[in-house]
Image (tube, rainbow, N blue to C red):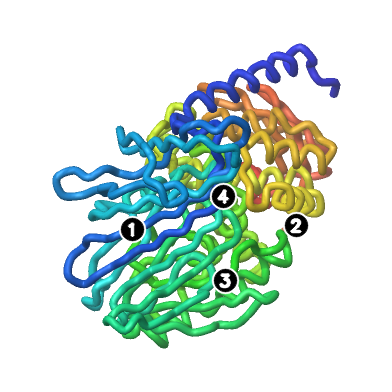
Amino acid sequence: MKKNTHNAKLFFVAILFLSHLIHAQDTYQRNTSADVQSYIFNLTLNDTNNQIYGEAIVTVAFKKEINAFALDLIAKSETFGMEIIGIFEDSVKIDYAYEDNKIKIIPKASASKQRSYKIQYHGIAERGLVIDTTKFGQRSFFGDNWPNLARHWLPSVDHPSDKASIEFRITAPDHYDVVATGKKTEESNLGDGNKLTTYKEPAPVAMKVVTIGVTKFANRLLGEVAGIPISAWVYPENRLDGFSDYGVATKVIKYFMNNIGPYSYAKLANVQAKTQWGGLENAGTISYFENSVTGKNEVEGLIAHEIAHQWFGNSASENDWNHVWLSEGFATYFTILYQESVYGDQKRKEELLLDRNQIIDYYKKKPAPIVDPSIVDPMKVLSTNTYQKGAWVLHMLRHKLGDETFWKGIRRYYAVFQNSNAMTIDFQKVMEEVSGQTLQYFFQQWVFTKGYPEIKWTWTYKKNKVIISLNQIQDHSLFDFPLAIAIEKDGEFIISSVHVNKKKNTFEIAIDSKPSSVRLDPNISLLFEER
């Protein structure tokens, strides 16, 4: 069938307009001249109170002109927030402004394009750094930054678009164990009842996925995969159960390394933690909710999801929050792919059916597209759309392109955007290059348009033909999609494929006798609601 070129042109204009609209909704005030290269966070923790003392060393590369730039840090109010002691460049105090929870740093006159700034501060974090007790009553300190809570305790560019290497130097009472983003490079008893522990991650990471964990831990090396140490850090009271539950991580990471590409980080620690989430995909140092440890080995899906994030969301990161499906949709679908590889195709079908039902239920309450430019609060971007519907988009793309091309495109996308940032259009372009297909309409209808096909249909048998009447009854955009139809005859199924692109559709399928049943989408390949 020849495409309507007039409609294609209109569609392209719509895409350009939508792209500008989406960028307009990214309300984060970005630095235009400065790019953070690295952070070093010196943090002092204590058992007397929740006050932290911090010194951040921020190295910045100026792109062209050397202008003032901003870092996020929640200012001190009555109880919570941080108070700045001083800001230094080359050991000399410099001018700065501190308004609306942003530190505006004014560089000294110099020809150097790369500068380091030292910010000394102290205070009590209301969020981001969770200072509490574990479920066993032990005092604990856990970083819990997602999506933009790092600003409560770490002066930084608290947005995924500016990634940098991270070093934590943590001084804490010596009875604590310390885990953090990166590889441990030092653990020294200071002789005053405190211990200094240093972790360094050379790969660039976004602040949403950096963390520390400070409490009493039991930890075990679970193994190494391609030279990457895989470990479990659990509460001593959960020692054996935790090592057992988290032990599957070595098998999971091996699957993703083999199928996607190289792992970006210095280690993979799986940490039992105080977190507001079921799991938080911190780069190389994943946090799992406290009760994830049961000894029953029931968290394989959760572990697979968070490890998948190490590739998608952490290394290849969304460039603004509205495109978070590039993180959550990918992690959701790659969990299904992992489960399919271990437990077979029936497991894939079961998971996709569950997700399809959740998408339908969610749409009835909140009809919106996956990329929803009306959302301006990062805390509100997560939904069934960004998780389950995002996963379904990837599944339909796999079905459209075929397994070999789909995986080739996934590996190319990761290779291009490893340790970098992408938008939906970037993923689309990679998949178009690999497949040789134009995918604009596919992404427009599934990612940028609300809903899915709602199908009302009937079938009859007449003169050696099954006649299927199929209507799209949704009250918004029409969808264009392939649909598999299974015709059951004598206990066997004959699968035919049709193309649906109109509101009212009629299909005729030749068969020499009346079938016992007719089913739509037998292989679970289409997101739709059957009415």
Of the residues shown, which amino acid type is indicated by label 4?
Answer: Gln
Residue 53 x/y as whole percent: 29, 60
Q: Which residue is mark 2?
A: 492
Of the residues shown, which amino acid type is indicated by label 2?
Answer: Glu
Residue at the spot 36% in from the left edge and 37% down from the top edge: 96
Residue 305 drawn above or below residue 23: below
Between the C-alphas of marks 1 and 4, the distance is: 19 Å
Label 2: how many Cα within 10 Å (few below 14, some 14–19, many 20+): few
Between the C-alphas of marks 2 and 1, the distance is: 69 Å
Q: Which residue is mark 4?
A: 37
Mark 4 or mark 2, which has the lower sequence index?
4
Of the residues shown, which amino acid type is indicated by label 3?
Answer: Lys
Between the C-alphas of marks 3 and 1, the distance is: 25 Å
Q: Which residue is mark 1?
A: 54
Quadrant for the N terminus in the image: top right
Residue at the spot 31% in from the left edge and 84% down from the top edge: 191
Asked whether the viewer can see residue 448, the reply is yes
